[in-house]
Image: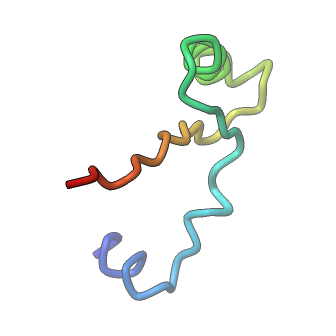
Amino acid sequence: MCLELISEGKIDVKTMISHRYGFSAEEVAAGFECASSPAQTKAIKVTFNLPSQAPEAN
């Protein structure tokens, strides 16, 4: 049911993300540190932005 509500746009999950990090080793470490200390960081949901990949040339 929850996935259905999300897919229909009835629940905006973007507002639940409290912290965003890149995908470098340093940022991943910082993101996990943030997520493991929610009382101090007020983290609700931590996400990592994956690098986009360019299509392979033929």
x then y, percent, for residue 39: 74, 22
Decide: is 52 above or below 29.
below
* Residue drawn at point x = 67 percent, y = 20 percent: 34
Q: Nearer the viewer, residue 23 or 10?
A: 23
* Residue drawn at point x = 53 percent, y = 76 percent: 11
Residue 27 sits in quarter: top right
Residue 30 sits in quarter: top right
**3 left or right, relative to 49:** left
Decide: is 25 above or below 56.
above
Decide: is 10 above or below 12.
below
| Tally of numbered tags | 0
Q: Quadrant of the N terminus?
A: bottom left
Q: Nearer the viewer, residue 6 or 53?
A: 53
How did the renderer colour the structure? rainbow
Q: Nearer the viewer, residue 27 or 41?
A: 27
* Residue drawn at point x = 60 percent, y = 24 percent: 35
x then y, percent, for residue 17: 64, 50
Q: Quadrant of the C terminus?
A: bottom left
Decide: is 47 above or below 38.
below
Q: Nearer the viewer, residue 48 or 19?
A: 48
x then y, percent, for residue 54: 40, 51
Which residue lies most toward the front here?
A: 58
* Residue drawn at point x = 35 percent, y = 71 percent: 2
**39 left or right, relative to 53:** right
